[in-house]
Amino acid sequence: MNGRACLIFRATLSLLVLGLAAPVWSQDAGPMPPAQNSSAQAASAVPAPAPAPASAPVPASPASAPSKPVMIEVPGGTHIPLVLHNAISTRSARPGDPIYFETLFPVMIDGHVVIPAGSYISGEVTDAKRAGRVKGRAELGIKLTTMILPNSYMVNLNATPSGAGSGGGETVNNEGKIVGDTDKASDAGTVIKSTGAGAGIGGIAGGARGAGIGAGIGAAAGLGAVLLSRGPDAELPRGSTIEAVIDRSILLEADKVQFTSPGQASTLAGPSNREPARNKIPF
């Protein structure tokens, strides 16, 4: 081999050695870090936006609010006939004692039954005063406070009696109190009977003069009997009827008074007729 060919061979061999060594050098140096995007760097420099404030609750629209019930008014002054279930008397009644009634006739508003017969009404005794010896009648005060309809719907009530059917001489005054009967006829009869009896005994004992003396003694005895007794008590036996008057209007929910029947009251025998009778002192 001549000199020129030798030089070419050496140059080729050197290039071959360098080509094989280049991958080894790149593996030893490790991978090159990727170039960072300039836009990403700019974004990382910008602070994160603050969180949005929580939105306030949206108020309910008027359409979603519950609607008020339709009410039916029973005007003040309405009369309700009642029958009594438990007897009361000034002899034993005390303020606060309960009383129980039942309606006898339905109450109609605009052609519809709103208080059927057979509804219950309760109340209490407010005052009980016995009659005096010579004057003053017995008085019984009551008030009606609650009404329960047949479907158990309960409403507050404010009513007072305006009339009473008790089988005796009880009446209702302008204050709504039940007033006992008077016994003037019985008082006069007691004095007359005592006077007559005394005159008869005196006449037998001493003639006309004795009769006069006996009559005076008999009259005094009769008056004494009256003074030692009370007037009749005010009584409402079981089955007595009263007519209650509503003092103030009451409101009933229309959907709770959809009655299709006038109702029916219990059958209670009315009280028997009775005569007023005085009560011995101290009873």
Image (cartoon, rainbow, N blue to C red):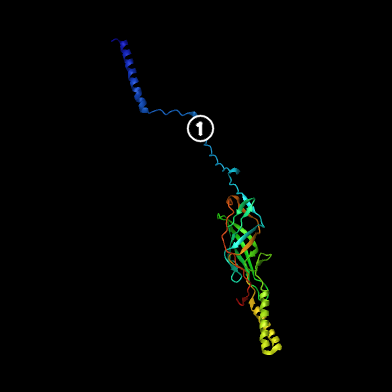
Element assignment for label 1 = helix
* Position of 1 relative to 126 (above/below): above
Residue 186 seen anywhere in this rendered image of the structure: yes
Who is closer to the viewer here, 40 or 82?
82
Residue 199 versus residue 9: which sits nearer the camera?
199
Q: Which residue is mark 1?
A: 43
Query: Percent x, y for residue 206?
Result: 68, 90
Q: Residue at x 61, y 52 (%)?
A: 113
In the rendered image, the quadrant that contains the N terminus is top left
Question: Residue 8: image x %, image y %?
Answer: 33, 13
Instruction: Tell me which corner region of the image, top left, top right, bottom left or bottom right, holds residue 3.
Output: top left
**Quarter assignment of residue 186:** bottom right
Q: Quadrant of the C terminus?
A: bottom right
Of all residues, the one furthest to the bottom in this rendering is 206
User: Eyeballing the image, is 156 above or below 187?
Assistant: above
Position of residue 274 relative to residue 190, above or below, is above
Furthest toward the left, the residue is 1
Q: Residue furthest top?
A: 2
Label 1 crowd bin: few (<14), some (14–19), many (20+), radius 10 Å: few
Give 40 or 264, whichever is nearer the viewer: 264
Q: With 32 as the anchor, is 82 left or right in this view?
A: right
Residue at 37% x, 25% y is 26
Return the x and y of residue 33 as percentages of the image width and height: 42, 29
**Type of residue at label 1?**
Ala
